Amino acid sequence: MKLFLEDGTLTAGESFGAPIDAAGEVVFNTGMTGYVESFTDPSYAGQIVVLTYPLIGNYGVPDPSAWESAKVHIAGLIVSEYSAQYSHFDAQRSLSEWLKAAGVPAISGVDTRALTKRLREHGIMLGQLSHSGKKGAFVDPNADNLVAKVSVKAPSLHGSGPKKIIAIDCGMKENIMRSLVRPETTVVRVPWDHDFTRDAYDALFISNGPGDPTRCVATIEHIRQAMTAGKPILGICLGNQLLSLAAGGKTYKLKYGHRGQNQPALEKGTDRCFITSQNHGFAVDPKKLSKEWDEWFVNGNDGSNEGVRHKTKPWRSVQFHPEACPGPTDTAWIFDEFIETI
């Protein structure tokens, strides 16, 4: 199998996934574990993922109840060394078997350290995994509305508590639902373009998701209308970008994004730093927000925005994942504060 990058780089390796070709955006993830959760995260739709940790597959794949969605969303996988022999009490099959069944190509024997350095220096590039060995057309997944492809198609009800939360599913991870559904809440999970503005609810939640946030025109407009009600709002990852856009802000594409479970988020106005799980290629420009908003968190590595909050209204969002899966749960308290606000 061969890997083609748009800058002309060509790398050969061994195939251990589906025997097909795939094209997408080549990105890297620095996590040491959690490949099952990452691959089933809808935010990875359209992306060929390079895992920087050298040995992958050694603990196999567990039951679907442990996944973050019902299927694999990555377009392809690149690793240094694939472990065909796996061992874990939860494992039901190998990573290779799983990827083949999901129709996802994968390549091993690649110098992922060199490849990651190239992506850091050049920036994220389009690429192709070619089982046939022939170069095809490069495809930019961000040219499509990826959120529309991964969002749920119809509303669904979860829980039976007295407080009703509308959760906009832009590609929501299952652990976010696990974090929101509590004895005191009822969560209504709705599609990305669902008009909830006339519904009765106590708070609004905006989920993570893939691609360029500016393509979610309907979602942004509904959030903007919801702000007139003044009810609590919490956004995560893409939700941080959508809330900021609804507030009149701007977003931009990062050079190579943040993907992994070791990203430092500094809480402004304090001396606290949280280690967070992240997966995003776009970010909020806090300078474009009005004076009614404060920057809540910043990235300890590159200084980019990691969250915003309104000075007087109960509206806030973070760029990282408080629910983790995979990753640390340092910021799980953000869900607690949201529920307390309601």
Image (spheres, helix red, strand yellow):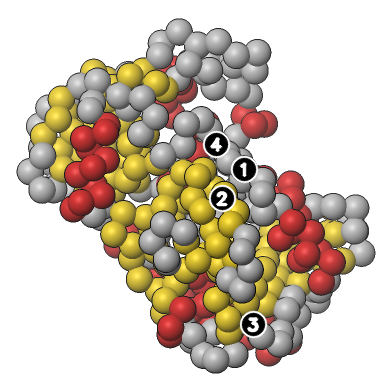
Rendered location of residue 122, percent (x, y) = 18, 53
**Dot label at residue 276:** 2
Rendered location of residue 310, percent (x, y) = 64, 82
Q: Quadrant of the C terminus?
A: bottom right
Of the numbered discs 1 and 4, the one sitting upstream in the chain is: 4
Query: Is 140 situated left or right of 339 in this image?
Result: left
Tell me whether the residue at label 3 lies in contact with that at label 2, contact meaning CB atoms closer than 8 angstroms: no
Q: CA distance from mark 1 to mark 2?
A: 6 Å
Of the numbered discs 2 and 4, the one sitting upstream in the chain is: 4
Where does label 3 land, which residue? 310
Q: CA distance from mark 3 to mark 1?
A: 26 Å
Where does label 4 land, which residue? 37
Q: CA distance from mark 2 to mark 4?
A: 15 Å
Residue at point 81%, 71% (across, down): 341
Tell me whether the residue at label 2 lies in contact with that at label 4, contact meaning CB atoms closer than 8 angstroms: no
Q: Nearer the viewer, mark 2 or mark 4?
A: 2
Where does label 1 land, which residue? 328
Asked which secondary structure carries label 1, the reply is loop
